[in-house]
């Protein structure tokens, strides 16, 4: 590659001009696809698995929040999140990020797993997250009661954020929703695994086992696997917040749902944010595979009545097409929809895919549900799946989950990580050699005509599309 041409291109094509035309990475889709994250900024290295202190993930997120940054990992293994010093009794990492990329694919070996606390990125803006696992779990102390071992929160949560994409991640084993992602603008969650919300883990409200709570203004959720969650698989949060998700536009496409625990495990979509609110959803090409937890009489989704103390402002609007429920054949998806709204179907039903002129460039092309099923099982989750991810995929393929919890009495619905295989072991792995600490493997730099002793070359434009050298390197780790 002619590095002079590359350098001149940087001068003629600054990142600010590229931001709205260049995807976060080549396979990014949906409303979060133009997030630029830490493009053109500094590199922050996670160098240990500690909860606090220099080199920890908690420290890196604080450092990254100060200016444009890409977080890379020089270690692999499990990071146990401890008590938050600013939040008494809460086990969490809280970070309000702006212009940050969290590049989990840079970790050696099997990568990174967070446990023991919530990753809370509420209020963040322009963020890319790839190839991270977060499983909350319990404290696991055999001398304590179930309630004493309970850890509050979910594996990850983002509210009041903007311009965010989460790709090829895995979230599970939480006593609340594994993932909360709503009251946000321009977001995408794609190719993720959301698995095994803990059913009877000691929550003060009783049994949970929740998968995810999703929505956005606008938001895309595509090619995700929801597996063995008792309920909220997924909970479509609805237009509920006059200051947040008031005018919802949702793409819920090509997701795979397996072994949910209740007939209406996927539900929601209320339009109750007051005058002028709306909720619109393209519900296309999703594949449902019932399991032993609830083997029959299932629906794609329950369109819900208003929450307690609320009233519906008006009907939500839904376009259903090409969704598959194994064992229940029908040419009309609406026959697999439970309508509890009080409105007639013809008031809720869109006859063609929903769109808005300002969203045309963001809309995600959908493939058939059967193709999505194959592709999700092939690709969802982290790029180098751990033992838990591999087992979940095998559960889906066989239709018979391997594990169950004592309290649920339903195959696949668990109460604690100990009911399954427990926490995986990650073998020690050597990080790449990166003498200039620019985030790139020295061997890759030499092969591609870069200088492994010049950290500044990470930000030269290195592709015709406009990606930096660091981005091209990180994308290559994801097979792009």
Image (spheres, helix red, strand yellow):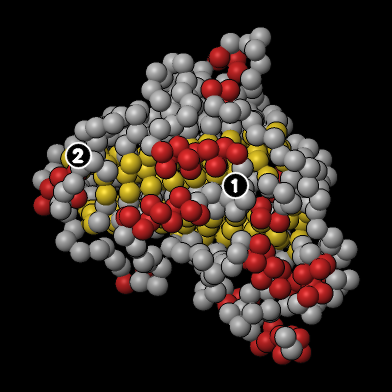
Residue 366 relative to residue 166: left or right:
left
**Secondary structure beneath disc 1?**
loop
Residue at x 58%, y 28% (from the top left corner): 421
Figure label count: 2
Q: Judge whether 256 appears above or below 15 on screen.
A: above
Residue at x 37%, y 43% (from the top left corner): 257
Is residue 378 at least partly visible in the picture?
yes
Residue 267 relative to residue 425: left or right:
left
**Secondary structure beneath disc 2?**
strand
Q: Nearer the viewer, residue 11 or 71?
A: 71
Circle 2 Cα neighbour tier, 10 Å, few/some/many (<14 / 14–19 / ≥20): some
- Dot label at residue 43: none
Is residue 243 at least partly visible in the picture?
no
Whether label 2 touches label 1, CB < 8 Å: no
Query: In front of the other: label 2 or label 1?
Result: 1
Residue at x 78%, y 75% (from the top left corner): 447
* The quarter of the displayed image where residue 343 is located: top left
Q: Judge whether 282 appears above or below 345 on screen.
A: below
Q: Nearer the viewer, residue 243 or 35?
A: 35
Instruction: Give the CA separation, mark 2 to mark 1.
Output: 36 Å
Q: Which residue is mark 2?
A: 338
Residue 16 relative to residue 220: left or right:
right
Q: Quadrant of the C terminus?
A: bottom right
Q: Earlier in the sequence, mark 2 or mark 1?
A: 2
Q: Nearer the viewer, residue 194 or 290?
A: 290
Q: Which residue is mark 1?
A: 385
């Amino acid at each position: 590659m002619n590095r002079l041409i590359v350098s001149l291109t940087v001068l003629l094509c600054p990142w600010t001009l590229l931001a709205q035309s260049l995807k976060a990475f080549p396979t990014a889709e949906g409303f979060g696809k133009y997030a630029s994250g830490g493009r053109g900024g500094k590199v922050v290295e996670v160098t240990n698995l500690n909860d606090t202190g220099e080199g920890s993930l908690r420290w890196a997120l604080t450092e990254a929040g100060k200016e444009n940054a890409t977080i890379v990992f020089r270690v692999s293994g499990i990071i146990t999140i401890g008590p938050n010093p600013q939040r008494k009794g809460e086990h969490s990492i809280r970070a309000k990020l702006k212009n940050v990329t969290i590049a989990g694919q840079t970790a050696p070996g099997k990568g990174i797993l967070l446990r023991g606390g919530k990753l809370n990125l509420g209020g963040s803006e322009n963020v890319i997250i790839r190839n991270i696992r977060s499983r909350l779990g319990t404290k696991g102390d055999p001398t304590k009661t179930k309630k004493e071992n309970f850890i509050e929160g979910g594996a990850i949560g983002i509210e009041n954020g903007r311009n965010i994409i989460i790709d090829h991640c895995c979230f599970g084993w939480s006593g609340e929703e594994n993932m909360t992602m709503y009251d946000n603008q321009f977001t995408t969650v794609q190719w993720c695994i959301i698995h095994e919300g803990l059913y009877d883990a000691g929550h003060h409200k009783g049994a949970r086992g929740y998968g995810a709570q999703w929505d956005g203004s606008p938001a895309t959720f595509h090619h995700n696997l929801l597996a063995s969650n008792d309920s909220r698989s997924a909970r479509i949060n609805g237009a509920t917040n006059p200051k947040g998700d008031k005018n919802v536009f949702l793409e819920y496409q090509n997701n795979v749902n397996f072994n949910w625990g209740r007939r209406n495990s996927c539900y929601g979509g209320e339009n109750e944010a007051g005058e002028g609110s709306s909720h619109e959803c393209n519900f296309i090409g999703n594949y449902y595979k019932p399991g032993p937890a609830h083997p029959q009489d299932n629906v794609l989704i329950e369109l819900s009545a208003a929450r307690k103390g609320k009233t519906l402002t008006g009907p939500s609007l839904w376009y259903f097409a090409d969704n598959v429920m194994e064992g229940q054949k029908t040419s009309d998806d609406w026959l697999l929809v439970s309508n509890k709204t009080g409105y007639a179907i013809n008031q809720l039903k869109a006859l063609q895919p929903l769109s808005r002129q300002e969203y045309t460039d963001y809309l995600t092309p959908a493939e058939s549900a059967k193709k999505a099923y194959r592709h999700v099982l092939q690709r969802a989750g982290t790029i180098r799946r751990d033992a838990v991810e591999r087992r979940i995929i095998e559960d889906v393929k066989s239709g018979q989950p391997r594990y169950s919890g004592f309290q649920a009495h339903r195959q696949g619905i668990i109460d604690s990580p100990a009911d399954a295989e427990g926490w995986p072991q990650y073998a020690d792995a050597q990080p790449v050699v990166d003498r200039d600490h620019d985030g790139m493997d020295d061997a890759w730099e030499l092969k591609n005509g870069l200088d492994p002793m010049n950290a500044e070359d990470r930000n030269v434009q290195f592709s015709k599309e406009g990606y930096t050298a660091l981005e091209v390197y990180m994308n290559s780790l994801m097979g792009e």
